[in-house]
Image (cartoon, rainbow, N blue to C red):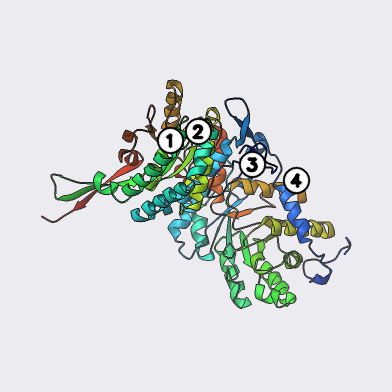
């Protein structure tokens, strides 16, 4: 591929040209990221950055308007005992809860992300998925997290998956589109890389690892492969694409490892909530506990932090 | 252990590791201290645990606590009995280990035997202390009012410094039999038996995380044991006035229950009683309306 003007947003690239992933190399690289020594001052900055990148998420069948309002309160007031905290990047809810979140976050600089397209399975006709997306956007979502049709992708119908993402992107209008690959169902890192390339060429603003409903969810391995795909796509086209690992990142330490990986793979330009997000529900409290520990020197207990 | 003179075979020395969440990791810090005999010879290298090891142990203990508390009293008794059985089977090893650390042969035998018996003693109390300490209370309204015990939760413990095995067992057994989980800092002077006791626990049916055993320096870890916000009670067995004071001060932050067991002769029969169980129990009183 060359840097000459190619209309990259509408053409399915040749997926057979996508480089193969060296799995052993990925594992070794990931192990390195976890052995960096991070000193106190950097750690505090990193923890605050993690907070600012969190998409505070509730995606349960049992979600109620009350639960969503509570989550929004948490997003606004992370931990008032600690001054100078950033707020989270967004709250992430089901389309039916977008209106509630909109109301609860009125006047706040916190985005509302909504999952759409028959989340989490993605097994619905395109018309339903489009309607799902339009409804979420109309209700006030400024970010849409869509799932790809893994069934179609695994069956080799790459074109259909591509066209679907293009159509959803159009339905999003001004809303940002995050494309969930559900890497836990793709099986190999090679497929993760291919799906990433496909999604980016189809117009994804972000690519995201998982729904959080399938194990394994986000791992450092798949995230690294996706980050590398983003890097190469940027070199090819000059367009920056964001990254969102989601599911299974619940400790502050692990989140900081992800930041190290981000820094060493994509560089400083991506180190903002505009280009990197964590999809998590319990991560925020662990980060807050670590920040409180840094301030007081005393190890903390979840008993003294609000639940979200 | 020391190599016998004249033997051609190189003996295989044991690595004394710590016990967290049912596993035997080395200390996260990679630090060690040499345990010396009275002549200055090195007996073993012992892990010098860091506060991060302690933090990890608390996470493990917290995770294990609800499940352990939910286990039936009968089962907790059986598990403790099993620990005693395992200890009995390794009696000679423990005696040899105590002797190696400078305890006399007779005293060592007595200490191991008493430890086994003490486990049996508390195993027996497992399904009895609740009846003894619970009460139906007389109240002057139409309520059925009763009080029962519930485990305090996660307990940190500074084991007696001068009793490597018996002191440890006498504090761990009453704590866990009541449904608590614990993090123990072993005797700094006599740490070997604590690590071997962890292996006994591991070979019994004690779920991972219920007992976590660290070795290391008191001076380094006492503060953390007392201040950690996710620990509900602290037991200490020998602290000078100043240390005890600072420990109680640090424990006040999250209103930890502080249990002092200083100046206890663990060899005496007066050192085993069910009040040791009640030390780490909370009383829950229920007012239940009844018809006239």
Secondary structure category for the residue under label 3: loop
Which of the numbered marks, if any, corresponds to residue B263? none
Q: Are marks 1 and 3 on the same chain?
A: yes
Mark 2 or 1, nearer chain start: 1
Q: CA distance from mark 2 to mark 4?
A: 49 Å
- Of residues B201 and A275, the one nearer the viewer is B201
Q: Quadrant of residue A165?
A: bottom right
Residue at 73%, 64% (x, y): give it. Answer: A189
Residue mark closest to the camera, 3 vs 2: 3
How many residues crowd around disc 1 within 10 Å: few (fewer than 14), some, or many (20 or more)? many
Secondary structure category for the residue under label 2: loop
Q: CA distance from mark 4 to mark 3?
A: 50 Å
Secondary structure category for the residue under label 4: helix
Figure check: B108 above or below A280: above
Which of the numbered marks, if any, corresponds to residue A268? 4
Please name the residue that numbered disc 3 is placed on.
B13
Q: Position of residue B20 (x, y in %)?
A: 54, 46
Please name the residue that numbered disc 2 is placed on.
B187
Residue A71 left/right relative to A266: left
Numbered disc 3: what chain? B
Q: Position of residue A131 (x, y in %)?
A: 59, 72
How many residues crowd around disc 4 within 10 Å: few (fewer than 14), some, or many (20 or more)? few
Q: CA distance from mark 1 to mark 3?
A: 26 Å
Numbered disc 2: what chain? B
């Amino acid at each position: 591929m060359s840097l000459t003007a190619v209309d990259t947003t509408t053409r399915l690239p040749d997926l057979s040209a996508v480089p193969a992933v060296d799995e052993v190399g990925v594992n070794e690289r990931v192990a390195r990221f976890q052995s960096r020594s991070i000193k106190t001052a950097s750690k505090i900055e990193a923890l605050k950055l993690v907070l600012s990148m969190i998409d505070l998420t509730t995606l349960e069948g049992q979600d109620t308007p009350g639960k969503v309002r509570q989550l929004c309160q948490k997003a606004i007031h992370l931990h008032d005992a600690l001054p100078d905290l950033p707020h989270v990047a967004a709250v992430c809810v089901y389309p039916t809860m977008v209106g509630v979140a909109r109301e609860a976050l009125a006047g706040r600089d916190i985005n509302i992300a909504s999952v759409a397209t028959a989340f989490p399975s993605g097994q619905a006709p395109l018309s339903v998925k489009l309607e799902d997306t339009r409804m979420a956007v109309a209700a006030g979502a400024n970010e849409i997290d869509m799932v790809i049709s893994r069934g179609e992708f695994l069956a080799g119908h790459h074109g259909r998956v591509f066209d679907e993402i293009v159509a959803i992107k159009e339905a999003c209008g001004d809303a940002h589109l995050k494309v969930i690959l559900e890497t836990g169902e793709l099986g190999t890192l090679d497929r993760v890389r291919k799906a990433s390339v496909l999604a980016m060429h189809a117009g994804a603003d972000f690519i995201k690892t998982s729904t959080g409903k399938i194990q394994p969810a986000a791992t450092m391995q798949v995230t690294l492969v996706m980050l590398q795909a983003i890097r190469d796509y940027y070199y090819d086209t000059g367009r920056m694409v964001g990254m969102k690992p989601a599911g299974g990142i619940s400790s502050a330490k692990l989140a900081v490892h992800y930041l190290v990986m981000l820094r060493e793979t994509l560089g400083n330009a991506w180190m903002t909530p505009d280009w990197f997000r964590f999809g998590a529900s319990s991560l925020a409290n662990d980060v807050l506990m670590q920040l409180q520990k840094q301030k007081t020197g005393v190890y903390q207990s979840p008993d003294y932090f609000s639940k979200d | 252990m020391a190599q016998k003179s004249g033997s051609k075979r190189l003996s295989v020395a044991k690595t004394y590791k710590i016990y967290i969440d049912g596993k035997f990791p080395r200390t996260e810090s990679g630090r060690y201290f040499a345990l010396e005999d009275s002549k200055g010879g090195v007996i073993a290298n012992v892990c010098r645990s860091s506060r991060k090891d302690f933090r990890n142990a608390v996470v493990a203990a917290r995770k294990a606590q609800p499940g352990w508390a939910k286990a039936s009293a009968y089962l907790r008794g059986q598990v403790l009995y099993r620990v005693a059985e395992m200890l009995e089977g390794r009696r000679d090893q423990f005696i040899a280990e105590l002797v190696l650390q400078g305890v006399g042969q007779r005293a060592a035998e007595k200490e191991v035997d008493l430890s086994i018996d003490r486990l049996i003693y508390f195993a027996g109390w497992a399904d009895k202390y609740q009846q003894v300490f619970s009460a139906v209370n007389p109240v002057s309204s139409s309520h059925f009012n009763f009080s029962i015990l519930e485990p305090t939760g996660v307990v940190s413990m500074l084991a007696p410094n001068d009793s490597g095995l018996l002191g440890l067992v006498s504090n761990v057994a009453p704590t866990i039999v009541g449904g608590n989980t614990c993090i123990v800092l072993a005797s700094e002077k006599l740490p070997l038996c604590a690590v071997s006791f962890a292996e006994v626990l591991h070979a019994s049916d004690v779920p991972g995380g219920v007992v976590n055993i660290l070795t290391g320096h008191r001076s380094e870890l006492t503060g953390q044991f007392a201040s950690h916000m996710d620990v509900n009670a602290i037991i200490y067995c020998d602290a000078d006035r100043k240390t005890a004071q600072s420990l109680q001060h640090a424990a006040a932050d999250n209103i930890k229950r502080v249990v002092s067991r200083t100046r206890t002769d663990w060899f005496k029969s007066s050192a085993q009683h069910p009040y040791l169980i009640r030390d780490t129990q909370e009383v829950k009183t229920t007012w239940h309306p009844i018809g006239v």
